[in-house]
Amino acid sequence: MKVLFATSELAPWVKTGGLGDVAGSLPAALRAQDVDVRVLVPAYPALAQAFPDAVEVARPHWLGGLLPTPGLKQAVTPDGTPLLLLDYPHYFDRTGNPYLGPEGRDWLDNHLRFGLLSRVAAWIGSDASTLDWQPDVIHCNDWQTGLAPAYLRYLPGRLAKSLLTVHNLAFQGLFDHASLFELGLPDASWHLDGVEYHGYLSFLKAGLQQADAISTVSPSYAREIQTDAEGMGMAGLLRHRAARLSGILNGIDTQAWNPATDPHLPNHYGPRRLEAKAANKAGLQVEVGLDLRDDLPLLAVVSRLTEQKGLDLLLQIAPRVLELPAQLVILGSGDHAMERAFASMAHRHPGQCAVRIGFDEGFAHRIEAGADIFLMPSRFEPCGLNQMYSLRYGTPPVVRATGGLADTVVDAADEKHGNGFVFGPATAAALLDAVQRAATAWRDPALWRRLQKRGMARDSSWASAARHYVDLYRAL
């Protein structure tokens, strides 16, 4: 089976969130299932530098509207995954975040940039393609490739089937009516059953409407987004297409995230050597300037600092958490007011609270290994990865019962399957109760060791997810 995996991010080179991680791991897992998969991704500077010897294999012409003629270059990742790099420097030779300019606002030509990505994906899946390889399925991801199923709808000849995976329904790719012409879409597509969405052109809505199948990144999130409360305005359409919608839980890169071999850790450990985890805790305390205390639980956050992640709730209860007593370490960036509030808290509680604004991959690994308890109080979380990293690293997480968090973390009250702590309402009081339960459990070494070992035994690899995707491709 031949599959084109179209994405706007690809870890480790370009990543703003879970999409980059999925694109960096799932294609290799699919190849292990005998799928002939090729990844289409823009040739951002990091990718152009990583693959300087990439060879041009095609130049898609006559794409319509104001879309230019790009190049397609071929390369292969270190794990053997074939890449098709969409080469058009005027659109993609921009450093930093792939969607935002230096001032933190969306690039004004994002509709053309990702319209081109979508259009070339459709071109590859059509009879117009000059490549000697044509996919059976185009696997699109989020709004940035959401127009590909719409383009396929209006192209003639033999066409690939399309699957759209929604990693986060909140980002919908909304642009004004004038972009319809610029993107080369026919007037007939401006319709309730086409690309129009409340007077805007929506890349995501177009994909949800036109894709042959839709998936999202956890079973619970697939159910949640069909409700008016969680559907971000798309619930009616998703209910209409429910027969074509499935939830497939993401995996994680179990080689990169393995406490027994992780190169970022000063001390390796596993379920049979959990006592070595204590040395990572001490190392983390020294690294961030916390007091060396093995008699206090160390709580951690690695996240975007936003209300979606529920971190405003943590701000409300932080003084109570520190009074348990406990220590707290936070790594992340996001809302500037929230950044300042957490930094101020660390300033008021030296030795007990440490905050680092930004992101550092190695530091994130050391936090997962050194912390006792990981906090993810998200208001919504399509899948989530850090809770799976935490389980694998023997760091029981505290999570809200939403999306992929609900699908991966079982509350400690379940004496047979419990591996963490789960709360329901998105309130400060509910979060505090869960944190207090976790801190109490931490002081029971036998109970804590059972929670750790259950979490570490959970299979979080991509193999299971890849099998589900292969079944979906075959059904298409």
Image (cartoon, rainbow, N blue to C red):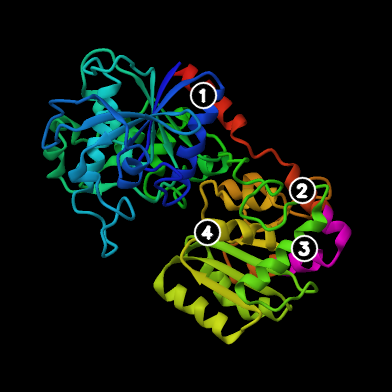
Mark 2 falls on what kind of element? loop
User: Residue 5 occupies which quadrant of the picture?
Assistant: top left
**Looking at the image, is mark 4 or mark 3 earlier in the sequence?**
3
Distance from the alpha carbon under mark 4 to that under mark 2: 32 Å
Residue identified by numbered label 3: 278
Residue where numbered disc 2 is placed: 270
Alpha-carbon span between mark 1 and mark 3: 38 Å
Give percent across and percent down for residue 155. 21, 21
Mark 1 or 4, nearer chain start: 1
Instruction: Name the amino acid type tagged 4.
Output: Arg
Q: Magenta region, mostly helix, strand or loop?
A: helix
For the residue pair 396 and 423, the one nearer the viewer reads as: 396
- The image's mark for residue 379 is 4
Q: Can you identify the residue that label 1 sits on?
A: 31
Alpha carbon separation for disc pair 1 and 4:
35 Å
Say few, some or many: other residues with alpha carbon within 10 Å of mark 3 (under 14 / 14 to 19 / 20 or more). Answer: some
3D distance between C-alphas at marks 2 and 1: 29 Å
**Residue at image x 48%, y 34%?**
78
